[in-house]
Amino acid sequence: MLQNSAEFRNLGMSKSKVWTWGAVFVGCFFLSSLLVGAQSSITQQDEENVWSLHCSLRTGLQLDNNHFDDGTTIPESYGSIPTLLKLSLRNCNLQGSIPDLSGIPNLGYLDLSSNHLSGPIPTNKLSKNITTINLSNNELNGTIPASFSGLPLLQKLILANNSLNGSIPSSIWQNRTQNASESLTVDLENNSLDSISGSSDLPQNVTLWLKGNPICLNVTNSNLVLFCGTKSENETIISTATNSTANCLPESCPYEYSPTSPSTCYCAEPLPIGYRLKSPGFSDFRPYIKAFEVYLTISLNLNVYQLYIYSFAWQEGPRLGMYLKLYPVFDPTISSTFLFDKTEVSRIRRKLTGWMIPDSDIFGPYELINFTLPDAYKDDNVAEFDTPSLGMSSGALAGIILGALGGAAAVTLSAIVSVIFLRRRLRNYRAVAKRRQDEQNRNRERVLALQQWQQRQQQN
């Protein structure tokens, strides 16, 4: 099916049953990232074909939660894939030692956790672009190599639940220049570590977890008391407002005040967007917020100030979910800039639902969770259209399902889907006329209130 897909870049196969791996992927020489999701079943012959894929991959290989046959190891050749940025083989039943990955010049993300990997950790230094190293829940032994020091972008070093021994190099967290948005978490819990070489004083924004190590027995150092306590990791949702609207009168604005507008108290109706990064190349989003704002607004042909990241939170995967708001462009010479026009709404929607945002080496592929039109955009001036959860219509989704099933099962499913669609439309039909009329009335009231507010602004 994909032998001649020269432009194919990303493939997600979550919860799939893969039995003919080699036949599927032969000839995909321009595949930039391969993501195979949880609970896939891969035979030993498939494994051999997976491992041979390195010649055609460009940036990412993610095969998390696939149960490879006993005895499967990570090939040494993986350490010489020059373009690889992300390698994630979490919970794949892998055995043997960790290959030397220092020959991957731009590797930014490494997750080999929850396998049966054994032996010492390779001592050669990884790429300076590395943000995440997760080797937890394996059977690794030996000491923690000093090569984990001097990695300027490192955000997470997770070596918990192994059999590592000896001293912890404090150089891992020392001599790091960090600003308020950067952090480093070092999780070494449940090993056999007995001391720290150097100072135990941590710089700001560095977190160290040592519970379950001999070093935590008979603790007298006050710092170690903190490090040996119970770990608490909060999946925080952070608002990123940059322009305070505290002094703006809420009763003067029928919509919302933009927190990112170049003009204080700019009143406009945003488009709310549910957005998720499926395979980001970092563990802490905060240092990358500004870069993401530039990346997404350029892709949408918007100004940076039109994007407001209302909140974000890490989700299982790990994936990064976001709630975004897109505000109309601010133009003081035009009195009606408080709403996007119909053409602009359609253009933005088409960009997002059509997967027209280019993949990024750092941010990876994305998925659109929702694109919900506020009432102000549902009147006669702006076309009302369905809000897809993943950027495809119900009919298109049904077509994909039917094509995958085929035969009698497809006929049965077709009837069920048709009944569901028909009942949904009949149930909503009677309410449509009244809802539109109510929305038009509310919009007229909002426009009148906004005009009054603009008049007061001009008088002031």
Image (cartoon, grey):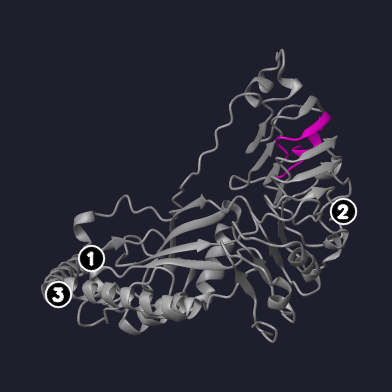
**Residue 388 belongs to magenta span:** no
- Kindly identify which residue carries mark 2: 100
Q: Residue at x 29, y 67 (%)?
A: 269
Instruction: Give x and y (percent) for residue 163.
Output: 79, 32
User: Gap between marks 1 and 2, in whole Å?
Assistant: 65 Å
Q: Quadrant of residue 207?
A: top right
Q: Quadrant of the C terminus?
A: bottom left
Callouts 1 and 3 close, C-beta under 8 Å: no
| Total numbered circles | 3
Instruction: Give x and y (percent) for residue 211.
Output: 67, 26
Between disc 1 and disc 2, the foreground one is 2
Between disc 2 and disc 3, the foreground one is 2
Identify which amino acid the numbered label 2 is placed on.
Asp
SS class, disc 3:
helix
Identify which amino acid the numbered label 1 is placed on.
Gln
Q: Residue furthest bottom?
A: 4
Q: Earlier in the sequence, mark 2 or mark 3?
A: 2
* Residue 440: mark in rendering: 3
Q: Residue at x 44, y 78 (%)?
A: 402
Q: Is residue 386 visible?
A: no
User: Gap between marks 1 and 3, in whole Å?
Assistant: 25 Å
**Residue 165 belongs to magenta span:** yes
- Kindly identify which residue carries mark 1: 457
Name the one closer to the observer, 35 or 403. 403
Chain part drawn in magenta: 159-177
Identify which amino acid the numbered label 3 is placed on.
Gln
Name the one closer to the observer, 9 or 53. 53
Q: Crowdedness of circle 1 by 10 Å Cα count: few (<14), some, many (20+)?
A: few
Q: Is residue 403 above or below residue 49?
A: below
Q: Residue at x 67, y 22 (%)?
A: 223
Q: Residue at x 78, y 38 (%)?
A: 139
